[in-house]
Amino acid sequence: MEQLTDVLSAISHPTRRAIIKRLASGPTRFLDIAEPFDVALNAITKHLKLLERAGLIEREKIGREVFVSLRPEALRLVADWVHEYERYWNEKLDEFEGYFKQQQRRKK
């Protein structure tokens, strides 16, 4: 449950979600990740550390460059957790639909 909390915290910020989206197309240099954001490199570093702590990214230094890769497996925790509630809501919506169908039959 602790890793799920870390992942949910990591994806709660729009900048970190944008970084994840960018990394979904493949490993990227640190500076290329930071380029579209109008914030200091230090801020991007903090976002990356949070993503790394949650297990969503990994860094690899190749020469002088730092490449960052997405590790999407951690997102499976979120998908599984949401799926549990999806079943609940599907059941409730089915009950709701049944209620309205019953009401329509009564009106006829």
Image (cartoon, grey):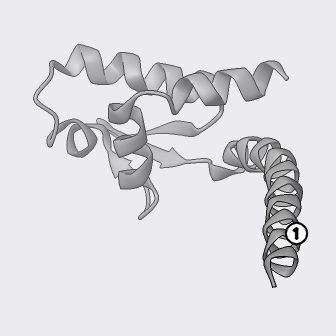
Q: In this view, does 11 lie to the left or right of 61?
A: right
Residue at x 55% of width, y 38% of height: 58
Count up the numbered dots: 1
Residue 83 percent location from the top left of the image: 81, 52
Q: In this view, does 19 lie to the left or right of 103?
A: left
The amino acid type, in three-letter code, at marker 1 is Gly
**Which is nearer the eye, 96 or 70?**
96
Q: Which residue lies furthest to the bottom in this view?
A: 108
Q: Name the residue under label 1.
A: 98
**Which is nearer the eye, 61 or 59?**
59
Residue 61 percent location from the top left of the image: 43, 37
**In which quadrant of the rendered view does residue 38 lie?**
top left
Q: In which quarter of the image is the C terminus?
A: bottom right
Q: In which quarter of the image is the N terminus?
A: top right
Q: Is residue 96 left or right of residue 59?
A: right
Callout 1 secondary element: helix
Residue 78 percent location from the top left of the image: 72, 42
Residue at x 65% of width, y 33% of height: 55
Residue at x 59% of width, y 38% of height: 56
Residue 46 percent location from the top left of the image: 38, 16
Q: Which residue lies furthest to the left in this view?
A: 38
Q: Which residue lies furthest to the front in this view?
A: 108
**Which is nearer the eye, 40 or 18?**
18
**In which quadrant of the rendered view does residue 8 lie?**
top right
**In which quadrant of the rendered view does residue 14 lie?**
top left
Q: What is the crowding at mark 1: few (fewer than 14 residues within 10 Å), some, or many (at least 20)?
A: few
Q: Is residue 70 left or right of residue 7?
A: left
